[in-house]
Image (cartoon, grey):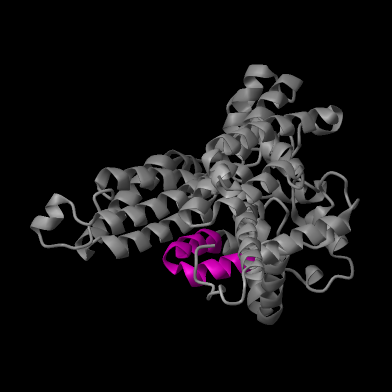
Amino acid sequence: MSWSARLSRHERGLVAGMLVLGFFVRLAWLFLRPTERLIPAKSEMWHVAATFAASGRFADAYAPGSGLSSHVGPFNTAVEGLVYRAFGIGSLPAEVVLAVIAAVTACTLFWLLYRVAGELGIGLVPRLAALALLVFVPFNFWVEMVDFRIREGAFAAAIATALLWWLLRLDAAGGRQGLNAAGRRQGLNATPTTFDRRSQLCFALAAGFAFLINPGVALGAYAGLGCVALRHLPPRRWLPLAGVLALGFVMVNGAWIARNATVYHRLMISRGNFGLELDIAYADSVVAPTDARAAWHARMADIHPFFSPTALARLKTFPDDASYFAALGHEATGWIAAHPAAAARLTLRHLRELYFPPPWLFDPYESGMRGIGLKLTFLWTLTALGLAGLLLGLRQRPRQYLFVALTLAFPTALYSLVQPTLRYRYAFAGLLTFFAAAFVWRLAELVLSSPRKRGPMTSDI
């Protein structure tokens, strides 16, 4: 039996073993420095979670007594708030429970990525190599186990990957199974048996929940489902499908939208802080700074109420934080309109920093600038190989990789409008890891094969 056949025979055990070991490795990593890694990671979300634990209110994002908050979403803050209510705000038992949740979320994400890679035709060896890289290389441990004990990054990435897997399976099932009985009677040729009204509602609820966590993830899912509908549903079914999606959205998000309308007297379907993020990213001081880190800190001190008592005092002159953020958003859009060329350059710079982060973006995380050269070399190389693998996949399997492109495109577009951070890129880092492994594996096959056996790069990656 060949070694590849042995791997295939033991694939399920290998994957399960790596994921279980990865779970315990992450918990052990926390306890190597518990006084540094098991203390609360204070942020706007943490403040809201602590207030929710004490009073049940989504408030005090910037400081105690700063009022009701539109800055963060309700789900993650409510989960952490309930844990704090049960075990004590910021207590060691509470942080351990949250760490277990974070580790489970990360390992669930890795399993979903592995399944998506299989649906995309990536071979067993590169899939296992990519999984091992994500599970055991401690490049993202701080983000996964400290930042994401409260922030939604890993959870959003897991939801995006689950929806991508769902879309790939819906599309494949529609293409294989053909008509249902009703479709055959009516002479239709594109109605899959797995895309009935029940499955549409389930997807609508899942996409609506994704919007509650991360709107960019949900927009990619909606676009992907639109592609499935165009391929497999007759035009007369498109409008009912849109109605089902709207129903699912309202069922999940209606209570939060109603809360925002009651509190802020305006329609607010997501968070209210986009104007703040936009104003941080577009201003004279950040166009061509001599020290990008210092310029960012100065900008935060100017307008961000979490980082600056002066900005907090300015916020309190407005009726609520949503009004303050709206004013900042108006300021930012005015600047963009007055400086279109500079704004375009900033957007391209944000895009580059999102995929190829500069050294200063590592500063807020553990170890600061230590070993930054090695980290950047690893990260930039992996990203470049991953993008090459994505392009190869689009060339070889455009039908399936279109869903991948949509999954990545919408979060990328939204994050390009704000100043990126390392945690933002986590939404697509896992997928790029699998694409990088697939690309390297394909190159190795081409190099090791004899010239007579080499064919065009059209096989599965």
Compared with 244, 373 (above or below) is below
Q: Quadrant of residue 443?
A: bottom right
Q: Magenta region, mostly helix, strand or loop?
A: helix
Q: 284 left or right of 61?
A: right
Compared with 65, 444 (above or below) is below
Compared with 101, 340 (above or below) is below
Q: Quadrant of residue 294?
A: bottom right
Let me know if residue 393 is in the magenta part: yes
**In the image, residue 387 lies at what x, y percent?**
63, 66
Q: Quadrant of the N terminus?
A: top right
Q: Nearer the viewer, residue 27 or 365?
A: 27
Q: Nearer the viewer, residue 274 or 384?
A: 384
Q: Which residue does the image show at 35% across and 56% down from the upper left? A: 172
Q: Which residue does the image show at 72% across and 42% down from the upper left? A: 136
Looking at this view, name the residue that lies furthest to the left: 185
**In the image, residue 224 lies at what x, y percent?**
42, 59
Q: 268 left or right of 46?
A: left
Q: Nearer the viewer, residue 66 or 286?
A: 286
Q: Nearer the viewer, residue 209 or 308?
A: 209
Whether residue 264 is visible here, answered yes or no, is no
Q: Quadrant of the C terminus?
A: bottom right
Looking at this view, name the residue that lies furthest to the bottom: 341
Q: Which residue does the image show at 62% across and 36% down from the upper left? A: 19
Magenta segment: 387-410
Let me know if residue 242 is in the magenta part: no
**In the image, residue 436 lies at what x, y percent?**
65, 60
Whether residue 186 is visible here, answered yes or no, is yes
Q: Which residue does the image show at 62% across and 52% down from the upper left? A: 430
